[in-house]
Amino acid sequence: MSKSRFERGQIDRIRLHVLPTQRFKTFSISLYAGLPLTEETVTPVALIPFVLRRGTASTPETIAFRERLDDLYGAGFGFDVYKRGDAQIVQFRMDVINDRFVSSEQPLLSSSLKLLGEVLTDPASENGHLRSKYVDAEKDTLRKRLESIINDKIRYAGERCLEEMCKDEPYRLHPLGRLDDIDGITPQSLTEAYHKWLADASFDLYVVGDTTLEEVKTLVTEAFKMKGGTPSSYALPSANKNVKEVRTIIEKMDVSQGKLNMGLRINTSYADDDYPAALMYNGILGGYPHSKLFLNVREKASLAYYASARLDGHKGICTIQSGIEIANYDRATEIIKQQLESMRSGSYSDLEMNQTKAMIANHLRELQDSANEMIAFDFNTVLSGRERTAEQLMEQVQSVTAEQIAAVARKTELDTIYFLRDGKEV
Amino acid sequence: METLSYPGVQETLYREMLPNGLEVVVLPKPGFSKTYATFSTRYGSIDNRFAVGDQAPISVPDGIAHFLEHKMFEEPTGDIFATFASQGASANAYTSFDRTVYLFSATEQIEANLETLIDFVQNPYFTDENVEKEKGIIEQEINMYRDNADWRVYFGLIDALYHKHPIHIDIAGTAESIGKITKETLYSCYETFYHPSNMFLFVVGGVQPDEVMELVRNNQAKKSYERQGPITRYFDPEPASVKTPRKKAVLPVSLPKCMIGFKESRQPLEQGALLRSELTTKLMLDSLLGSSSPIYNALYDDNVISDSFGHEYNSSEDYAFSVLGGETKDPDELLRRLREAIENTKVVGLTKEAFERTKRKKIGGYLRMLNSPEAIAGEFTRYRFRGADLFRLLPVYESITLEEANARMREHFNWEQMAVSIVAKDVD
């Protein structure tokens, strides 16, 4: 496990995290840019990466820009916008093969960082603003993305549950922003938002592959036009929140299967000492096919194909999701509540404890085989400000006791029940 | 145990054929923490009429291969997931058109997990009661897919393309078809398709090949299998035409989803030619319609497609079809524009530059895929079942010419053999 130490450095406002290794056939690069979620900024910030992917000052035409990627042996290039805790994170990802497998005229790592630097700091512009054509087209694309959330009913139900549960917190916001705010964005206003984002966001650049911190430092200095300053850190708000009463939301849509979701406040976050116990709580409750939800909702009662729990460690929320026959709503809710109750009463067998510990340990060891997963795991450290290697987390999980899990269970509160069922919208 | 070296991709494989007919391949990945193993049978949703040796053919209910996959996880001692969990492994399985794959991934207790994988797949336990219980779970799985617009538009297209070939049948079957499944039908499918000579074990990760082989050899030596004659699969002759030129389903979606398929009706190809044709078609499609192509960019700029637009190609000995499409505000406009652009390109041909660039991109994508044990296991098995070798694709890619790609394009896009599948929120 000691093979997974990132070397750290910084160039101006960008923190660098480099893992030199020859295990992969590729270089994996990730650039994270994060800001607190706010109603005013969420939509323009979400739109920025859509526009930046269209072209750079030196390759302004989209086709030419994409041909550049194809020429780097089909370098993978993509981005994602999501939320962690109350932060909105934009992540650019690149994956390019190591030169030793091909006869490339251009060094692939430096060409990739050069391209990423241009994307971030030197986009295609005209008359002092981002290209209007791209801003307009990507507004449409963003609108379609937001409207399409409804297409995937499982995801839709999950997001609606969180939105209802966090209606008074920034976390209610969708990471892609608000539909109603798209129309008002102009190339000028987006350019302003872009400059402000470049100035305010926290930047972290990860590189995993056959390279060194020194090499990456040199390449980043040449490739990124953001001079001066020092990196800023994340300050996620407390994950603790008391629940006054459980809210039940029922929504109707033309669906064949009911989607039953629940949101729990676990009042523990990644930075806390009892986070490993919270991981165990989530795992015993519903993280795996040996967990209580799968066994009781699916295997014993045959009510569902899927029934699971998922933890957002930065927000301190555990969500439960299941797809059920609509008529079985009461029965399924009852069975899930019984599982929450059995978590509270501390009734976990040694078998459940050992299985869950083994599964979490396996997951943490498996991370080491994927450059992107190692990066994602390490970024938790940056976000939470809590240093905890995969190895340390594994040791902490191993030593969690049943009493510690019960303590998490006792401060965990059911907040919201959301049910998407058949019928016309009311 | 034979050793196969592939210096071009810096990989070495170890292979052995056991006396009972089971083929085992090990790919050591030095430095990897994880071991990923798949145990696969050449048995999928299309195998609904078959015979062994000179026995009489039998027909089985739709969805039975998938049902069998679910039921394999139950042992007299309980659920096998629990055993894997105690050994720190995550296990799973999936059923596709032509294969069923059982798998685990683990970082410790590899020997115990490997034994568990082989033993549970080779130990069926079906009772009237546990078969009935599973029907409720699978009905919910079927309902889940009914609500999934991407799944509906994709399988709607395959159903529109094929009259007879069982590829058009839903992998999970229907509530009605699975209602007919009994423990007897499950056992007869099991006996036929889970014979070691119809199966393939692939292990990739931080393992020692000789230790893995030794373990599997000893495990199999303890079990007795009678020799089994060859399996014959029966398919009714498939007409060249498509079944339904235009098919539509109504679901609450924000924008229509539209997929366009071209069905090929050529004579079966021998394995080498089939592989070359598949790779050529994929290169051609990406060069023609990929995200750096002029056609894609013009359609995107004119708001006819979104960035969900994609393409794929599926082929086997007895079926071959492409799928193009994604979200669009106007399926008819998309169809008209694609037809016009493809017909134009058929006349002038793909450019040398675009073709060579796409080739590089494909080679890069192939090498990147080799980082992932999961992808290697899945793809290696898929090619192996068709008599091809995943690690020999690089020279094939390199040798494909622009002329071949252009010929493939002119042959493939036959508008008489096209079907369209649409999922939209309104009837029309």
Image (cartoon, coloured by chain):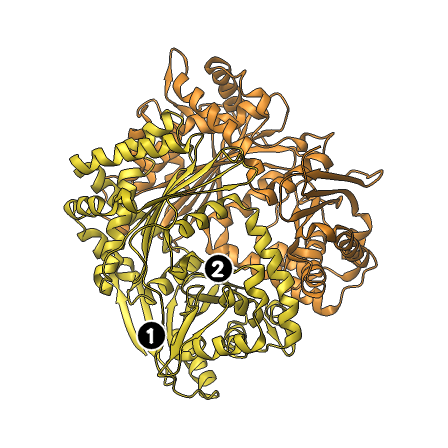
Q: Is residue A180 left or right of residue A268?
A: left
User: Relative to B6, does residue A33 appear above or below in the rendering?
Assistant: above
Query: Cα distance, mark 2 to mark 1?
Result: 31 Å
User: How busy is the neighbourhood of tag 2: few (under 14 within 10 Å), some, or many (20 plus)?
Assistant: many
Q: Position of residue B51 (x, y in %)?
A: 39, 77
User: Residue at (26%, 53%) from the top-left corner?
Assistant: B279
Q: Secondary structure at mark 2?
A: loop
Label annotation for residue B15: 1
> Badges 2 and 1: C-beta atoms under 8 Å apart?
no
In this view, the residue farthest toward the left is B403
Where does residue A103 sit, x and y in percent of width and height?
22, 47
Mark 2 highlights which residue?
B171
**Location of residue B305 by image quarter:** top left
Q: Residue at x 73, y 37 (%)?
A: A165
Name the residue nearer the viewer: B61 or A99: B61
- Give the chain ID for the yellow colour: B
Q: In the image, residue B100 lies at what x, y percent?
A: 46, 66
Q: Residue at x 50, y 49 (%)?
A: A373
Q: Nearer the viewer, residue A335 or B337?
A: B337
- Taking the spot 55% from the left edge, 40% from the top edge, the residue there is B251
| Amino acid at pointer 2 | Ile
Which quarter of the figure is the C terminus of chain A placed in? top right
Describe the element under mark 1 as helix, strand or loop: strand
Query: Chain A is which colour?
Result: orange
Mark 1 residue crowding within 10 angstroms, few (<14) / some (14–19) / many (20+): some
Query: Which comes before the other along the chain, label 2 or label 1?
Result: 1
Let me know if residue B230 appears in the view.
yes
Residue B334 is situated, as x and y percent measured from the top left of the image, at: 37, 32
| Chain of the residue under label 1 | B
A390 horizontally vs B396: left or right: right
Question: Which chain does the residue under circle 2 lie in?
Answer: B
